[in-house]
Amino acid sequence: MRVVGVGGEGAYGGPEALRVFECPERHAGTGEIRRAVHAASVNPTDTFIRNGTRHATNRELDPPYVPGMDVAGTRIRAEVPGGVDGVALQHTSVLEAIGDGGALAAVRPFVGVTARGITVHLVSVRNYALRSDALDRLRQLVEERRVTLRVAATYPPERAGEAHALLERGGTRGRLVIEFRPEP
C-alpha cells in the first residue's frame, strides 16, 4: 500500500521531507477499523507530524510517520462485516466563508470576534465519537447540500509537499486534497 509520510526521527523537516512509501498491508486489530483511503486533506496537524513537532506522539510507532487526520475512503467490511456506528470528522473553516447568521464548528479553541451574526460552537471530536445520530445528521446535511465542502486543489501523492507548502503560506480557501488512485 502506498502512503505519504516521513521516514523517522532524522527525516522530519519542511514540505520537501515528504516521501511516498510502499508499506505492507496492515489489518485492523481489536477496536480498530480499516478503510481504503481515496483522499486525504492537508491540515495544520499534518504539518506538525511532518516537521517533528508531534514526535513524542509518534515515538511508539514504526516509521514512516503518516500525516492524514482528515481522510475519505471506503470501509473494508471483510474485517468489520456490519460496518461501524460512526466516523468522527474534523473540519475547519474561515469566518469570511460563512454566510450571515451562519455558524462555525471549531475543533480548536476559537479566539476572536465574530460579526454578521455568526455563532461559534466549540466541538470536541471525542464528544461525538459515539454520537452516531449527530454524525448521521451531518452526513444528511452534506448530502442535502446544506453544508458544503470546498476543495481548493487536488494533488497526487508525489506532490504532497506542494500542498503542505501552500497550506503553510496561508490564504487558501478550501481544502488541499491528496488523491490516492487505485494502483494498476
Image (tube, rainbow, N blue to C red):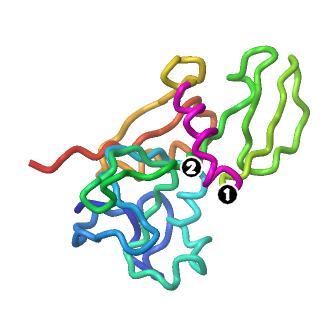
Q: Residue furthest top?
A: 100
Left or right of 169: which side holds 117?
right
**Residue that numbered label 1 is attached to:** 126
Q: Which mark is residue 148?
A: none
Q: Report which quarter residue 153 is drawn in.
A: top left
Q: CA distance from mark 1 to mark 2?
A: 8 Å
The kind of residue on which mark 2 rests is: Ala
In the image shown, does 15 or 41 lie closer to the viewer?
41
Q: Position of residue 95 (x, y in %)?
A: 75, 28
In the image shown, does 34 or 93 lie closer to the viewer?
34
- Residue at position x 43%, y 71% from top? 65
**Residue that numbered label 2 is attached to:** 88
What range is drawn magenta here? 126-140
Figure check: 110 above or below 28:
above
- Residue at position x 82%, y 44% from top? 110
Figure check: 61 above or below 82:
below
Left or right of 43: which side holds 179?
left
- Is mark 1 in CB contact (under 8 Å) with mark 2? yes
**Label 1 element class:** helix
Left or right of 71: which side holds 2?
left
Crowd class of label 2 (few under 14; some 14 to 19; many from 20; radius 10 Å): some
**Label 2 element class:** loop
**What kind of secondary structure does the magenta stretch mostly adopt?**
helix
Q: Position of residue 72 (x, y in %)?
A: 41, 44
Q: Report which quarter residue 97 is drawn in.
A: top right
- Residue at position x 47%, y 39% from top? 176
